[in-house]
Image (cartoon, rainbow, N blue to C red):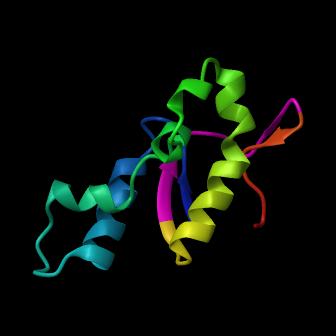
C-alpha cells in the first residue's frame, strides 16, 4: 500500500519527511539527510522500463494508476512517497484511488 505525504510546495513536506525518516529508518538514532531517500518523490518515469512512452503530461497522467498498481504488486508492503500532486481526476484518469 502506498502512503502519501502530499502537500503544497514549501509547506513543510521535507520537515515531515525528516521526522518520519528519522523515526522509521534511523538505526543509530542520528538524523542524516540520506534518510530522506526512504521517502522518495513519486515519479511515474521511475517505474517504467520504456520511458520513451512518456512524450507529454497526458502520458504521465494516463500512467498514474498503472504505475501505482505495479508498485503495490511488486513490493507488497507499505511504502511512503511524497508528492505535490492533488487528489484529482484529469480526463478520466485519477491520480490515486483506494487500491
Left or right of 98? Residue 43 is left
Residue found 32% across the figure and 77% down from its top: 24
Q: As rendered, which of 97 and 47 lies closer to the eye?
A: 47
Left or right of 36? Residue 7 is right
Q: Is residue 99 above or below residue 27?
A: above
Residue 22 at x, y = what percent? Answer: 25, 71
Residue found 74% across the figure and 35% down from its top: 62
Q: Is residue 26 above or below residue 42?
A: below
Quadrant of res 34: bottom left
- Which image quadrant: the C terminus? bottom right
First to last magenta residue range: 80-91
Left or right of 56? Residue 88 is right
Residue found 78% across the figure and 66% down from its top: 98
Quadrant of res 19: bottom left
Left or right of 32? Residue 49 is right
Residue 39 at x, y = what percent? Answer: 38, 59
Residue found 36% across the figure and 59% down from its top: 17
Q: Residue lying furthest right in this view? A: 92
Quadrant of res 61: top right
Q: As rendered, which of 43 and 12 lies closer to the eye?
A: 43
Q: As rendered, which of 67 and 94 lies closer to the eye?
A: 67
Q: Residue lying furthest front in this view? A: 50
Q: Residue lying furthest top in this view? A: 56
Residue 59 at x, y = what percent? Answer: 69, 27
Q: As rendered, which of 52 and 34 lies closer to the eye?
A: 52
- Which image quadrant: the N terminus? bottom right
Query: Is residue 90 covered in magenta?
Result: yes
Residue 96 at x, y = what percent? Answer: 73, 52
Query: Is residue 88 covered in magenta?
Result: yes
Q: Is residue 85 above or below residue 91?
A: below
Amino acid at each position: 500500500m502506498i502512503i502519501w505525504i502530499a502537500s503544497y510546495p514549501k509547506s513543510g513536506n521535507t520537515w515531515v519527511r525528516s521526522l518520519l525518516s528519522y523515526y522509521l529508518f534511523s538505526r543509530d538514532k542520528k538524523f542524516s539527510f540520506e534518510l530522506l531517500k526512504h521517502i522518495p518523490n513519486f515519479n511515474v518515469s521511475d517505474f517504467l522500463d520504456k520511458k520513451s512512452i512518456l512524450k507529454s503530461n497526458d502520458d504521465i497522467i494516463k500512467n498514474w494508476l498503472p504505475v501505482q498498481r505495479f508498485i503495490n504488486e511488486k513490493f507488497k508492503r507499505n511504502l511512503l512517497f511524497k508528492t505535490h500532486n492533488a487528489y484529482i481526476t484529469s480526463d478520466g484518469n485519477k491520480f490515486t484511488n483506494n487500491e
